[in-house]
Amino acid sequence: LAAAAQPWSTLSAVLLTHLHSDHITDLNDAVTGRWITSLAPNPLPVLGPVGTQRVVDGILAMLEPDIGYRIAHHEDLTEGPVVQVTESAGGVVLVDEEADVRILGAATDHRPVEPTLGYRIEHGGHAVVIGGDGVPCAGLDELCAGADAYVQTVLRADLVSQVPLQRFLDTMDYHSTPEQAGEVAQRGGVGTLVLTHQVPTPAPGTEDEWIARAKAGFDGEVVFGDDLTVVSIGDAPAP
């Protein structure tokens, strides 16, 4: 967010696809950052699957000493951070009529991690899908139907399978391969597929290999999603 010049105080909401540590480990920074950089009360909306409230409660308990230090130090801070949690099993998750934004959720398949959600963010007649971790499933197909862009975590099974560590090998059965992500995008008539959170960390210069695998079953555009990648859809100007 800092590199994107996006202040904590201006976030509309935080969306959690699931509660794996690598997807929520910075949530405490969002809670604290929003609280101490806002000049007026500014609750942080957090949307996620069932279990999100318990995680947020634990984060606030962990932050209790820090919250006390800051209140003692700053006269204008008189109460701790407020987090507004909405837990969802799918359906309409958020509607902001003023901003013309609607967010839909659907169950995804990242078992044994469950429940998990994917999101479809709609605005101005366009839609972007955030798949999160997981394998192809009916929920993803539902979200991706007619979407402009689909963002999906991907894993190269051909590379992971060469590592003789069972815990690493275990990751293959609950992440999509680039090929599977391409097939989901093709079924949904998606315009652009964005490959993100790549496993294992890609070697420099191998991005085209990942893209080629996704395009094996997909006719649209494929983008290798490094951090801070910007993808334009609809009438938005190109970055």
Image: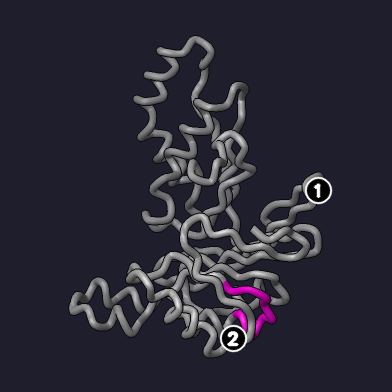
Can residue 191 be found in the magenta stretch?
Answer: yes
**233 and 79: which one is in front?**
233
Dot 2 crowding, Cα within 10 Å, few <14, some 14–19, many 20+: many
Residue 10 falls left or right of residue 59: right
Task: Name the residue that disc number 2 marks.
Answer: 218
Locate the C terminus by quadrant. Answer: bottom right
Label 2 amino acid? Phe
Residue for point 22% across, 78% down: 163
Residue 97 has which mark? 1
Residue 184 horizontal/vertical position (percent)? 58, 81
Residue 173 quadrant: bottom left
Residue 91 horizontal/vertical position (percent)? 68, 63
Residue for point 61% across, 30% down: 42
Q: Give the number of marks.
A: 2
Magenta span: 185-193
Can residue 17 be found in the magenta stretch?
Answer: no
Q: Closer to the camera: disc 2 or disc 1?
A: 2
Nearer-N-terminus badge (2/1): 1
SS state under label 1: loop
Residue 59 falls left or right of residue 130: left
Q: Is residue 181 above or below residue 116?
A: below
Residue for point 51% across, 16% down: 77
Question: Seen from this angle, which residue lies furthest top?
Answer: 75
Residue for point 37% across, 19% down: 69
Dot 1 crowding, Cα within 10 Å, few <14, some 14–19, many 20+: few
Label 1 amino acid? Glu
Residue 76 horizontal/vertical position (percent)? 53, 13
Residue 6 horizontal/vertical position (percent)? 56, 41
